[in-house]
């Protein structure tokens, strides 16, 4: 079964390992982490990890970032974890309440595009904060939504990027964080032939209203949202 979130998390761990950050000396912070498994995984593999999100009773987000998660992360743990190495905090991803140069790893998986503001300003503000709290030599792992057929984003609360805005409104706006390698924006024909799922079916995928046979036949890789084709893009920066 293929889901793009699994791809995001796996590549994030690969990047941490590749740049030598999965050590007991490292500290990490997750932005818009919700109940994702990565903070639990990192608690078993690094010195300390902070998971941050709004964690409010907000319509549409209670499942992804439940309001009781900061007080009871163990309730949502997908596997045993080091409780002493994980701290969950209610925090705005555009205003991180930490000193500069605090973390070896910063990570955010498909969250910044929902941070609001005009012309991707919420996402950029969050990236600037990541840049600030990251230690020199540290890495920032940022997955976001990418429109592969170069359309404009659907609305201000879903500010997906295209091949122009991913540079003009994000990458080129940063001061000291740089991509570790050039982006590869090519899409395989196999993905276009077999990996596109309609938005309504994607909702059923996430809410487990469909069985594994459906999921096997409908990989959750590219979402068709009207005339927009959206998938994940992974950005790895180093400061």
Image: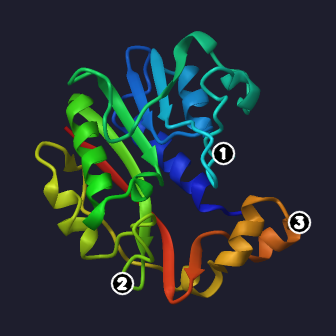
Tell me the quarter of the image containing the N terminus: bottom right
Q: Is residue 84 above or below residue 147?
A: above
Q: Residue at x 62, y 78 (%)?
A: 195
Residue annotated with mark 3: 211
Q: Nearer the viewer, residue 235 or 112?
A: 112
Image quarter where the C terminus lies is top left
C-alpha span from label 3 to label 2: 32 Å
Whole-number angstrom distance, CA of label 3 to CA of label 1: 24 Å
Q: Nearer the viewer, residue 220 or 55?
A: 55
Q: Position of residue 13 (x, y in %)?
A: 49, 40
What residue lies at 45% left-to-right and 77% top-to-bottom?
154
Reading the image, the residue beneath label 2 is: 150
Q: Nearer the viewer, mark 2 or mark 1?
A: 1
Q: Earlier in the sequence, mark 3 or mark 2?
A: 2
Say left or right for 237 vs 149. Answer: left
Q: Across the whole image, how many numbered discs are drawn on residues?
A: 3
Q: Which mark is residue 62?
A: 1
Q: Quadrant of residue 21?
A: top left
Mark 3 / mark 1, whichever is N-terminal: 1
| Element at label 2 | loop
Crowd class of label 3 (few under 14; some 14 to 19; many from 20; radius 10 Å):
few
């Amino acid at each position: 079964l293929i889901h793009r979130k699994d791809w995001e998390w796996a590549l994030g761990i690969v990047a941490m390992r590749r740049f030598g950050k999965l050590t007991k000396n490292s500290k990490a912070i997750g932005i818009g982490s919700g109940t994702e498994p990565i903070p639990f995984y990192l608690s078993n593999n690094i010195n300390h990890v902070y998971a941050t999100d709004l964690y409010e009773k907000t319509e549409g987000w209670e499942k992804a970032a439940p309001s009781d998660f900061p007080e009871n992360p163990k309730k949502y743990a997908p596997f045993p974890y080091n409780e002493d190495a994980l701290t969950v905090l209610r925090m705005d991803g555009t205003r991180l309440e930490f000193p500069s140069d605090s973390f070896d790893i910063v990570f955010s998986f498909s969250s910044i595009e929902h941070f609001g503001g005009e012309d991707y300003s919420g996402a950029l503000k969050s990236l600037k904060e990541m840049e600030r709290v990251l230690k020199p030599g540290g890495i920032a792992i940022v997955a976001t939504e990418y429109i592969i057929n170069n359309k404009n984003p659907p609305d201000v609360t879903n500010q997906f990027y295209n091949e122009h805005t991913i540079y003009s409104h994000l990458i080129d706006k940063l001061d000291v964080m740089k991509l570790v390698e050039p982006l590869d924006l090519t899409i395989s024909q196999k993905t276009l032939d077999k990996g596109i799922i309609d938005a309504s079916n994607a909702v059923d995928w996430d809410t487990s209203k469909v069985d594994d046979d459906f999921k096997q036949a409908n990989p959750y890789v590219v979402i068709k949202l009207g005339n927009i084709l959206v998938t994940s893009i992974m950005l790895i920066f180093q400061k």
